[in-house]
Amino acid sequence: MDKSERLFERARRAIPGGVNSPVRAFQAVGGSPRFIASASGSKIRDADGREYIDYVGSWGPMIVGHAHPRVVEALRRACEKGTSYGAPTELEVELAEKVVEMVPSVEMVRMVNSGTEATLSAIRLARGATGRDKIVKFEGAYHGHADSFLIAAGSGAATLGVPNSPGVTAGAARDTLLARYNDLESVENLVEGAPNEIAAVIVEPVAGNMGVVPPVPGFLEGLREICTREAIVLIFDEVMTGFRVAPGGAQQLYGVRPDLTTLGKILGGGLPVGAFGGRADLMRQVAPEGPIYQAGTLSGNPLAMTAGLETLRILSEPGVYERLESLSRRLDEGTRRNLDALGLDLCTTRVGSMLCLFFASGEVRSWDDASRSNVKAYAAYFQAMLEAGIYLAPAQFEAAFVSLAHSEEDIDRTLDAQRRALDIARKILD
Ligand code: KE4
């Protein structure tokens, strides 16, 4: 057994499944997860000293690369001033102002400690502000693990939600309606079936949790129209896309303004941060200015604010998104060449520096399409890439992330390994 395997055995005695978040356990791809000992730039190193080119980037936050010298130095200085006060600081004001400056629809913002906290708070705000109970989410979308979101597609055309985890009550499920991504008619049907009952539509403006599924032209604009017409709060869950697909996220890229936006991941630069923000008339209803309660011991924590601020400052420098685009295009075009060379008809998607290779042919526009993927072939591909020193998401329904620290050489090494890995996966596809 190598050190990761020994550590996994030990971890499983003290931590459920041996991990602090399920996807890390490699259950979708088999084998034992690599225990990571350190990381810098585009590389991570496991407990046995093996080095990998990293396309998980801690699931999105590490867009400037691991252990960026400026972030590390800023954190070192911050630590020496104490790590948490539970009181207002100038740092959190600076980060709030930076978010307001960068994200088009955000007029005010509240910091929290995770994406889940951000989305559950945004839903509570929408419900409190509208006096309505129901929300609409999309099948295959992930907004964190709050009860309202752990809902599977129920039976029946009404697509009423049913819990997809024990512990989620029927009451919670009853208030979550499920639509199909990229299908405005499915939203119209839900709205028609629940007049004046829907508080919010929450959407990943680029879906990143069923693999990467871009919005078809008109989809986001259509959601905006429906929500404006019905006085429904439109929430863009930009926990993944925020600061990723453009400085101002997907709402800047596609030019559609939600009423509320949830953020996380990159906002914390690798430390635990989430946030929800948007129209001031909504945000002013949040305690203590308004009656809608939301709180958090470590919200606005000075270390997390420091890492987030330094990361956003780096991202605000000229040429950053052009660099991300150039590297990501190189990977995407190289992947398509590899697929052509092997005669494989697989679907690849990309929005900026978030990409996905579906082990499914044809277009992927919704969960129905994505769920056709051959997850066994993906698992074989994943293991072959891991063996070759390329660290991908250990599950088909995730995104690959390119960072500023990746080099052309990293991309070319990845494409070389990919040819061999696809050849192995092809045997399962045939
Ligand atoms: P967290 O509570 O994990 O910080 O954020 C939840 C969340 C909310 N919204 C979107 C669009 C998200 O992608 C996420 C979290 N993303 C997953 C990756 N698919 C986190 C990885 C994990 O669960 O370990």
Image: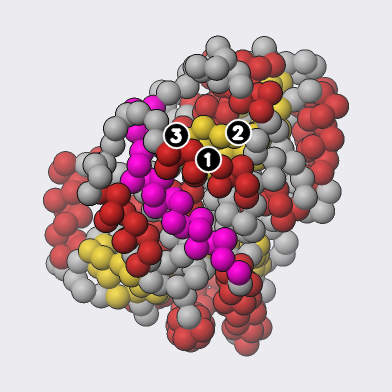
Looking at the image, is mark 2 or mark 1 earlier in the sequence?
1
Looking at the image, is mark 3 or mark 1 earlier in the sequence?
1
Q: Secondary structure at mark 2?
A: strand
User: Quadrant where the C terminus lies?
Assistant: bottom right
Q: Are marks 2 and 1 in contact (CB under 8 Å)?
A: yes
Q: CA distance from mark 3 to mark 2?
A: 14 Å
Residue 368 in the image, given as x and y percentages of width and height: 66, 48
Q: Which mark is residue 112?
A: 3
Q: Are marks 3 and 2 in contact (CB under 8 Å)?
A: no
In the displayed structure, 403 sits above or below 266; it is below
Residue 388 in the image, given as x and y percentages of width and height: 37, 80
Which residue is labeled 1 in the image?
Answer: 96
Q: Which mark is residue 108?
A: 2
Q: Secondary structure at mark 3?
A: strand
Q: CA distance from mark 2 to mark 1?
A: 8 Å
Q: What span is in magenta?
A: 296-318
